[in-house]
Amino acid sequence: MSFSIHYISTKYAHGIVCLGYGVAIASLCLAYRAKMRNYDPRWYHFAAVDFFVAVTLGAVFGDMNFHYTMKTFYDIENLNTYPSVNPSVEPGQQLMDVGRMYFSEGTHLDLKKTAAFKNNDVYCVTPITIGNDKLPSYDFWAVGLNCCSGEVADYHCGEYDNPNARAGLRLMRDDQRPFYRMAIQQAEAAFNIKAQHPLLLFWLQDPIAEMNSYHEDGFRIYLLGILIYFVANCFFVGLAVVGFSKLGYSN
């Protein structure tokens, strides 16, 4: 549920989950057969519950891990990369399929046109521009969450203070995009500018490293989940061994 098979086909991922539940059902069938042969079926019952819990937790937390980390990595990986983009020349409409973007020399953040929209969190935006002249349309925007106050020039998102930062990684959170758009609309009204086809980007120096961090975080969460369940499972198996032995049940 965490990795590429879920991204390629949700049906295949759910099919594998169903196979996992099939193991739990098989354990119940073995328990029934043992009971019919006058054998103790309790370890089969324990195994059935154990498999059911394992598959359920794996499916639920794997799906969460996928949507919060791995999906972003796969989405960006499947989008295009554009080099040497000039914000004063390239319209955002022609680059709507961008995942990673590298800007031409002299591109910078126009912190004097910072704006923010508050809705529990603070959604911060500032235009990406080149030179000092006013652009006909500001289509490239650096964004960040809870890293500004909404006041002019108070923007501390991403690598805003890195002189070597001249690239962008696309925002992939659909639930956040409308709030950033509202912040851009506020900037348009406050500074008398236009943003016809705004693209929302995280401003940084190395988009590839940032993108790979999503994959690393997802894999780290995956391994942590396996470790936690392994320890918990050993604990409950130990309790079952002690409990069954005290009750006089054999395995």
Image (cartoon, grey):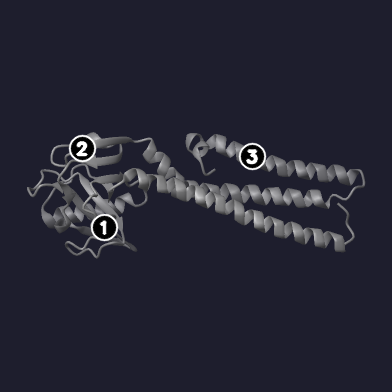
- Left or right: 234 as drawn, with respect to 129: right
Secondary-structure class at tag 1: strand
Q: Nearer the viewer, mark 1 or mark 2?
A: 2
The amino acid type, in three-letter code, at marker 1 is Cys
Res 137 quadrant in image: top left
Q: Nearer the viewer, mark 2 or mark 3?
A: 2
Q: Quadrant of the N terminus?
A: top right
* Residue displayed at 78% across by 45% down: 28
Secondary-structure class at tag 3: helix
Identify whether 15 is placed above or below 65.
above
Q: CA distance from mark 1 to mark 3?
A: 43 Å
Q: CA distance from mark 1 to mark 2?
A: 25 Å
The amino acid type, in three-letter code, at marker 3 is Cys
Q: Residues within 10 Å of mark 1 (few under 14, many from 20)?
A: many
Q: Which mark is residue 18?
A: 3
The amino acid type, in three-letter code, at marker 2 is Ser
Lower position in the chain sequence, tag 2 or tag 3: 3
Q: Residues within 10 Å of mark 2 (few under 14, many from 20)?
A: some
Q: What residue is shown with label 2?
A: 84
Q: CA distance from mark 2 to mark 3?
A: 47 Å
* Residue displayed at 81% across by 62% down: 242
Q: Nearer the viewer, mark 1 or mark 3?
A: 1
User: Residue 235: where, in percent of width, then height?
Assistant: 71, 60
Task: Pick whichever, 10 or 242, lies toward us.
Answer: 242
Residue occupying the far right of the picture: 38
Identify whether 16 is placed above or below 176.
above
Secondary-structure class at tag 2: strand
* Residue displayed at 42% across by 48% down: 214
Lower position in the chain sequence, tag 1 or tag 2: 2
User: Residue 46: where, in percent of width, then height?
Assistant: 77, 52
Lower position in the chain sequence, tag 1 or tag 3: 3
Q: Which mark is residue 124?
A: 1
